[in-house]
């Protein structure tokens, strides 16, 4: 809900098409083969999907049953994942991780049983162009589709995706490249039943012809355009529900909402039956001026189509019925009208049983497409609910229009914040004072000049495949919208920085890194940003550039300040490989290349207010405690050290007593230099200590030997989000490694 005005938004789960667009197709319960990361020879083992979060999967190795302690997250885009049976086809070794071998002595039997199950994740979702992508991502600009005619199901035409905004596609009809958008483009959600992959028309015996009312080309250009369209490959499949057979016949009368003008319910007629699945309905008119124009006021229907009702439905639900144009008389009466037309009403059994199980209620808020100008989406309020249909009042209109009638499963309605999430302009009531709210961008800003020219920020893309650095959580970055903007520079960049702060391991730390200081002054606009962490609120003044020419450099320098890839966010979308080649660089190299170049921090921004001052003081207290860093711990049993996995660095633990006054930590004997340790070596070392449960953090964050030597207590607490006790214990073991390195290998 909206706490400012008490409004309640329609629950997100009520919009089934939005949820469907976010699914990668991989669901809990599916099984796959994954590389066992802790093993030196990299065998594969079966794992089950426990839950999904965008392109992130929570997996559990086969053999752990209900034990959740070894569950691990992986990124579909980077993890080594394959369908069941792949390893044997490729002659790859299959062996479980050590934990499964301990639990399941007969692990070979466990493997055979798992491989025999019929629950493998589909190969096309783990490999190839669909890998890790949700259905929305597959419909990228430039790919082609076939568009079924709106009044004749046997006709289709090619179209190209010009823009994809969260699944809303702006389509340009093939062969109309030189025509203005008003005649050549249309907006449809990617799940619309008229959209099909290239080749669909030929496969279903349809005629290739431009849509009704778009006779704009010569016959030769039709063929050339469609041929060009079909050659573009698009990996796009839709699992649409089967269409039930109907029992309508030509001439039957009913009540209907005209999809092109969905503001009232009026009489209509079934004018053509194409098959057992679809028929054509036309809005009635008694004027006689368009009776021969089949396409005017006509639309395809099937039995379960929204917006068609039995005669008398409006009367029974206390709703007004608009008479057809040219109707004589004050009040419309169905009995007189049927007699006048010498027609019969479609019987009740032709329509599906009326349902009312949904979450829409009067006064709830949502976002809805304006049917008069489909490129615009408005804030909307539910004003009436009848069965499966709702009446919506659109806000932010230049000229008032009647309430919009929509089905609860309409593809043109969206939850609150959908536009903000997908970087789509949202129209809402213009406030007489104060202008737009800071985190919402509207078309009005662009039209009135606030976002114009040098002050208009381009789209800012979040390139989640790029290196996220020590402060930002890669999983949270992956959940951010693909882009924010365009719009006013200060507003767009403020939203970008707010999203980044909320994606941090410690939002307060990122806010401190971004706060205004004396160096690198942009002569921009000072904005107050906020962060919440562990129940406390923080705020600081952050300088944001005001003009478009500074945006790219501002984003790049902000990335470097946060020690992440300079392309993590900015006006350029990284499609496959990043120009910084950040996918192959380790955290150590990034700390070296970017971490050392950070601006010198100052405790308090000049001229600005910040309650981050407390955070700086806390860091000072930590420095005072470092004398007590190395606390004597009990030595682990020799048996635990004997179980060191093969390939790990050979460690000999020679214990020396030390006091709480900062004497040397216990001695460690290493056979190889920590500088040469791989991530696996570091993980194996941590597992030989009493901090073994923390080994997975080192694996997930890809900390190799060089990175290990750079870690200290503040870094462990802030980047690994550890409490003071575990951080001190872990830092104790790292200091042992450092001591051995300096004494034995650094000379």
Image (tube, rainbow, N blue to C red):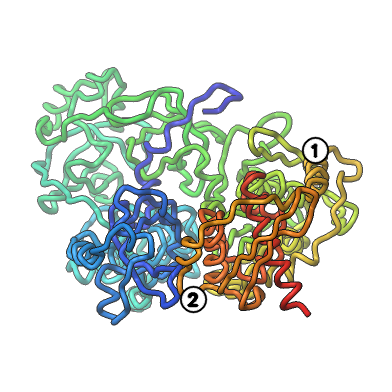
Lower position in the chain sequence, tag 2 or tag 1: 1
Q: Is residue 635 visible?
A: yes
Which residue: 33% across, 42% down? 259
Which residue: 59% across, 59% down? 462
List x then y, in percent, for residue 73.
Answer: 45, 56
In this rendering, the label closer to the viewer, 2 or 1: 2
Q: Nearer the viewer, residue 274 or 142?
A: 142
Q: Where is 731 relative to 304, above or below?
A: below
Label 2, residues with CA under 10 Å away: few <14, some 14-19, many ≥20: few
List x then y, in percent, for residue 41.
Answer: 41, 78
Q: Could you say whether the residue bearing mark 2 is in a helix, strand or loop? A: loop
Q: Nearer the viewer, residue 194 or 522?
A: 522
Q: Where is 720 relative to 433, above or below?
A: below
Identify the residue under disc 2: 647
Identify the residue under disc 1: 614
Q: Quadrant of residue 93?
A: bottom left
Which residue: 31% across, 47% down? 66
List x then y, in percent, for residue 181.
Answer: 50, 59
């Amino acid at each position: 809900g909206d706490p400012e005005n008490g409004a309640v938004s329609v629950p997100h789960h009520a919009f089934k098409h939005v949820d469907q667009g976010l699914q990668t197709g991989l669901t809990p319960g599916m099984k796959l083969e994954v590389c066992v990361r802790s093993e030196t020879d990299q065998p594969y083992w079966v794992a089950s999907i426990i839950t999904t979060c965008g392109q992130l999967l929570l997996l559990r190795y086969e053999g752990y049953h209900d034990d959740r302690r070894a569950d691990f997250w992986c990124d579909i885009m980077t993890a080594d994942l394959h369908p069941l049976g792949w390893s044997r086809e490729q002659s790859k070794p299959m062996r479980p991780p050590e934990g499964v071998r301990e639990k399941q002595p007969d692990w070979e039997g466990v493997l055979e049983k798992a491989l025999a199950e019929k629950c493998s994740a589909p190969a096309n979702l783990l490999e190839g162009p669909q890998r890790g992508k949700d259905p929305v991502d597959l419909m990228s600009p430039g790919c082609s589709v076939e568009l079924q005619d709106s009044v004749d199901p046997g006709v289709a035409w090619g179209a190209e995706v010009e823009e994809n905004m969260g699944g809303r596609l702006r389509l340009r009809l093939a062969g109309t490249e030189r025509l203005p958008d008003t005649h050549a483009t249309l907006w449809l959600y990617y799940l619309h039943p008229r959209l099909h992959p290239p080749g669909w028309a030929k496969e279903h015996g349809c005629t290739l012809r431009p849509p009704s009312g778009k006779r704009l080309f010569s016959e030769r250009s039709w063929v050339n355009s469609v041929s060009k369209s079909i050659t573009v490959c698009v990996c796009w499949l839709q699992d649409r529900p089967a269409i039930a057979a109907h029992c309508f016949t030509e001439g039957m009368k009913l009540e209907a909402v005209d999809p092109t003008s969905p503001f009232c319910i009026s009489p209509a007629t079934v004018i053509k039956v194409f098959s057992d699945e679809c028929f054509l309905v036309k809005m009635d008119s008694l004027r006689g001026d368009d009776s021969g124009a089949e396409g005017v006021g006509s639309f395809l229907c099937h039995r379960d189509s929204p917006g068609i009702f039995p005669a008398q439905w409006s009367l029974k639900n206390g709703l007004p019925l608009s008479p057809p144009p040219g109707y004589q008389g004050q009040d419309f009466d169905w009995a007189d009208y049927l007699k006048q037309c010498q027609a019969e009403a479609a019987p009740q059994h032709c329509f599906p049983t009326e349902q009312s199980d949904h979450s829409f209620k009067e006064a709830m808020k949502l976002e809805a497409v304006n049917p008069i100008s489909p490129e615009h989406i408005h804030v909307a309020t539910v004003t009436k609910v009848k069965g499966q249909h709702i009446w919506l009042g659109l806000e932010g209109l230049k000229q008032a229009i009647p309430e919009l009638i929509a089905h609860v499963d309409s593809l043109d309605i969206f939850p609150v914040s959908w536009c903000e999430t997908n970087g789509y302009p949202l129209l809402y009531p213009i406030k007489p004072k104060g202008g737009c709210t800071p985190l919402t961008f509207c078309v009005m800003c662009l039209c009135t000049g606030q976002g114009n020219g040098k002050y208009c920020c381009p789209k800012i893309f979040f390139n989640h495949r790029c290196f996220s650095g020590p402060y930002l959580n890669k999983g949270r970055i992956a959940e951010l919208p693909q882009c924010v903007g365009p719009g006013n520079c200060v507003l767009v960049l403020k939203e970008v920085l707010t999203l980044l702060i909320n994606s941090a391991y410690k939002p307060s730390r990122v806010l401190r890194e971004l706060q205004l200081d004396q160096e690198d002054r942009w002569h921009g606009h000072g904005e107050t940003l906020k962060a919440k962490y562990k129940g406390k609120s923080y705020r600081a003044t952050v300088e944001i550039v005001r003009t478009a020419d500074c945006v790219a450099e501002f984003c790049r320098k902000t990335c470097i300040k946060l020690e992440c890839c300079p392309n993590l966010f900015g006006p350029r979308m990284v499609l496959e490989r990043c120009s910084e080649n950040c996918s192959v660089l380790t955290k150590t190299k990034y700390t070296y290349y970017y971490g050392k170049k950070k601006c010198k921090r100052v405790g308090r921004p000049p001229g600005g207010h910040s309650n981050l001052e407390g955070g700086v003081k806390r860091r000072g207290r930590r420095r005072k405690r470092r004398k007590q860093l190395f606390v004597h711990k009990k030595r682990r049993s020799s048996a635990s050290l004997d179980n060191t996995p093969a390939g790990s660095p050979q460690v000999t633990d020679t214990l020396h007593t030390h006091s709480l006054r900062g004497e040397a930590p216990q001695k460690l004997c290493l056979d190889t230099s920590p500088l040469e340790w791989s991530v696996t070596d570091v993980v194996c070392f941590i597992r030989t200590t009493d901090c073994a449960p923390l080994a997975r953090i080192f694996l997930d964050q890809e900390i190799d030997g060089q990175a290990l030597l750079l870690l200290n207590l503040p870094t462990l607490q802030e980047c690994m989000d550890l409490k003071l006790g575990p951080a001190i214990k872990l830092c104790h073991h790292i200091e042992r490694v450092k001591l051995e390195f300096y004494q034995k290998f650094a000379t």
